[in-house]
Image: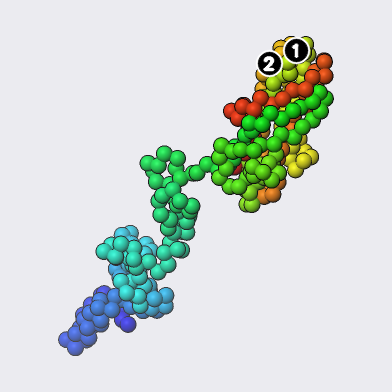
């Protein structure tokens, strides 16, 4: 370790020679020492042995700028030729850069993949079920009937069963947000009525009304059709919650109505959000 004021004073040959040797020692040791050199200049090096950091004086000779670690290969600096392979901790570096976990994932459409920029649905797959019926369920005057659905257009998550509790759409485990919609189409009997009220209701767990639709029909011709439809907004749910749709009708002559049996007009759907 050596430092010098870089001022060679007059003296005897031996004295000047010793002073020159001390200057050279300071130069080759990068002015190393536990404290900063007493004499400084712009762009002067200092190997700070207290902190273990190589420093350089700034252009204004007003402060020291840290360059690197004295006891670490390449002064602890990254080499361009290593393409970041010499990072001490890549995970910490990603966190410090705010990259999140997407930086370590593959692109694709599978679970956990990051969507490729040219993918048409950005990696999001539809989840849900649409159950329907072709059965002509009877709905008597002033009677409420839960509608069963014995077939499906699709079911991605075992939301519906065609035979067991087939009037239900059940929320899969882990799902917290869904949207529901339904349509019911009633046929009138052979006798025309002059006034009818039709109500469809979606219930949660057999109790709470989630959505409903009502239609008042002043003239209902024989064999006429009338469709009710209802849709919810996005609702919060828990796995195991189930939903049903029920229909009630009243008319002035006490006639029984029947579901049309058209699967395109009688359906119940859950969309997982």
Circle 2 SS class: loop
Nearer to the camera, 107 or 162 = 162
Per the rendering, the mark at residue 224 is 2
Name which residue lies at 69% across and 21% down.
187
Q: Is residue 246 above or below residue 194?
A: below
Q: Earlier in the sequence, mark 2 or mark 1?
A: 1
* Residue 80 visible somewhere in the drawing: yes
Left or right for 221, reference 4: right
Q: Is disc 2 in contact with disc 1, using a CB cutoff of under 8 Å?
A: yes
Q: CA distance from mark 2 to mark 1?
A: 8 Å
Pointer 1 residue: 192
Q: Which quarter of the figure has residue 202?
A: top right
Quadrant location, the N terminus: bottom left
User: Which residue is depicted at the point 55% across and 40% down?
Assistant: 154
Q: Quadrant of residue 201?
A: top right
Number of numbered discs = 2
Mark 2 nearby-residue class (10 Å; few <14, some 14–19, many ≥20):
some
Q: Residue 183: x and y, percent? A: 65, 28
Which quadrant of the rendered structure holds the C terminus? top right
Residue 67 appears anywhere in the view: no
Identify which residue is drawn at 64% across, 52% down: 173
Per the rendering, the mark at residue 98 is: none
Q: In the displayed orientation, state which residue is furthest to the front.
A: 190
Q: Residue at x 79, y 40 (%)?
A: 207
Q: Is residue 20 left or right of residue 130?
A: left
Residue 135 percent across, percent down from the top left: 66, 31
Q: Residue 206 at x, y = what percent? A: 77, 41
Dot 1: element: loop
Disc 1: CA contacts within 10 A as few (<14), some (14-19) or many (>=20): some
| Residue 259 vertical position relative to residue 218 in the rendered view, above or below | below
Left or right of residue 70: residue 95: right
Across and down, in percent, residue 208 comes to 77, 38
């Amino acid at each position: 370790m050596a430092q010098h004021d870089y001022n060679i004073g007059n003296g005897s040959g031996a004295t000047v020679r010793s002073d020159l040797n001390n200057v050279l020692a300071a130069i080759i040791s990068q002015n190393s020492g536990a404290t900063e050199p007493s004499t400084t200049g712009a762009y002067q090096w200092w190997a700070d042995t207290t902190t273990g950091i190589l420093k350089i004086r700034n252009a204004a000779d007003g402060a020291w700028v840290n360059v690197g670690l004295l006891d670490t290969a390449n002064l602890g600096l990254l080499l361009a030729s290593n393409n970041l392979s010499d990072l001490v901790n890549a995970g910490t570096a990603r966190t410090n850069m705010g990259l999140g976990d997407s930086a370590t994932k593959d692109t694709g459409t599978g679970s956990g993949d990051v969507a490729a920029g040219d993918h048409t649905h950005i990696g999001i797959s539809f989840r849900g079920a649409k159950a329907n019926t072709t059965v002509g369920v009877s709905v008597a005057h002033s009677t409420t009937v839960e509608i069963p659905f014995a077939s499906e257009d699709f079911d991605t998550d075992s939301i519906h069963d065609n035979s067991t509790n087939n009037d239900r759409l059940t929320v899969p485990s882990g799902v917290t947000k869904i949207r529901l919609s339904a349509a019911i189409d009633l046929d009138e009997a052979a006798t025309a009525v002059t006034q009818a009220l039709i109500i469809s209701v979606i219930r949660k767990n057999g109790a709470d009304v989630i959505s409903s639709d009502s239609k008042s029909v002043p003239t209902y011709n024989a064999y006429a059709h009338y469709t009710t439809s209802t849709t919810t907004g996005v609702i919060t749910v828990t796995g195991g919650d189930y939903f049903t749709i029920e229909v009630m009708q009243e008319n002035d002559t006490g006639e029984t109505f029947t579901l049309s049996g058209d699967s395109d007009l009688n359906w119940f759907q859950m969309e997982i959000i």
